[in-house]
Amino acid sequence: MNWTDRITLFTPLDFAAVGGLFAAWLLIGWRIEHPSQTRPSVSVLMAEYRREWMRQLVTRQPRIFDAQTLATLREGTSFFASAVMIAIGGGLALIGNSERLVGVANDLTLDSAPAIVWEIKLLVTLIFLANAFLKFVWSHRLFGYCLVLMAAVPNNAQDGAALPRAAKAAEVNITAARGFNRGLRSVYFALGTTAWMLGPLALMGATLFTVSVLWRREFASQSRAAILGDGDNMGLASRIAARTKT
């Protein structure tokens, strides 16, 4: 069966659902990382606290707390990378066992589509999982770079290199966190793509649900309210607005 024949196995609604899936993934990611000045996302708010963390690092003695905190962040990226790798292996094994895949799909939808249809649907899930794995691995490495930069910050706060190196460590830390968050979003959407097994309408519903969950957690969650709920919120907002303008 050539690619032309395979394409005809899917309806226009299937293509619309998949297109909407990838569009939603890109758009929600862009909005989270580039929010409005008046309503910053949790990711942007935490980026400012990461910068403040590195400024406090300059005068904190000893720095055991900072090393332990970063080690915990690296453990998180390592855990998710390992979990996603297992999921990718399971997906590939399922594709290799087409008969069982068709049996499960038929039980769910009572549809008699050929195995290639279910394999392609599962392949979309694997694309998101592969992207998540790459993001987690790179995030893990960047947190390692951040640890080296933190160790290079002089103990003397009066040293001219202290604040610039702390700022470098903060930006690398933020970049690592951004990669980790992108990996998590890919995992969310990978879970949503499994709804395609039930049809394109189910995929559309799962996409909307995934976007709503991400939107709430970044822009309307209790954790966001807690971050903004202290007396420093005005200064934090002004710093975010200044960085958004630049």
Image: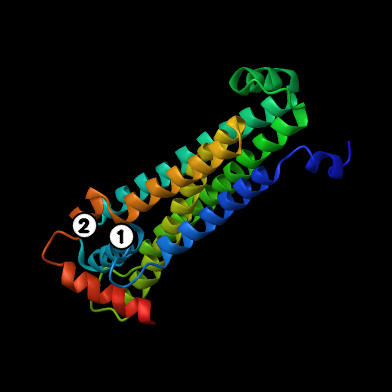
Q: How many marks?
A: 2
Instruction: Please report whichever mark, 1 or 2, sits nearer to the chain's N-terminal start.
Output: 1
Residue 216 screen position, x and y as percent: 33, 50
Which residue lies at the image location 76% right of the left edge and 27% below the top edge? Answer: 115
Task: Determine which residue is flagged by label 1.
Answer: 46
| Residue type at tag 1 | Met
Left/right placement of residue 60 relative to residue 98 reads left
Which residue lies at the image location 54% right of the left edge and 46% below the top edge? Answer: 132
The quarter of the picture where the N terminus appears is: top right
Which residue lies at the image location 30% right of the left edge and 76% below the top edge? Answer: 241
Q: Which mark is residue 224?
A: none
Residue 205 screen position, x and y as percent: 49, 41
| Residue type at tag 2 | Ile
Residue 131 screen position, x and y as percent: 59, 48
Instruction: Provide the secondary structure element on which disc 2 rests.
Output: helix
> Is any part of residue 118 visible from this angle?
yes
Does 201 appear above or below 90? below
Task: Determine which residue is flagged by label 2.
Answer: 227
Give the class, few, some or many, for how many residues have Cα within 10 Å of label 1's Cα (few <14, many ≥20).
Answer: some
Q: Is mark 1 in CB contact (under 8 Å) with mark 2? A: yes
Which residue lies at the image location 15% right of the left edge and 59% below the top edge? Answer: 229
Cα separation between marks 1 and 2: 8 Å
Does 14 appear above or below 173? above
Give the class, few, some or many, for how many residues have Cα within 10 Å of label 2's Cα (few <14, many ≥20).
Answer: some
Left/right placement of residue 87 relative to residue 3 reads left
Does 112 appear above or below 155? above
> In the rendered image, which quarter is residue 98 located in?
top right
Q: Residue furthest right?
A: 1
The quarter of the picture where the C terminus appears is: bottom left
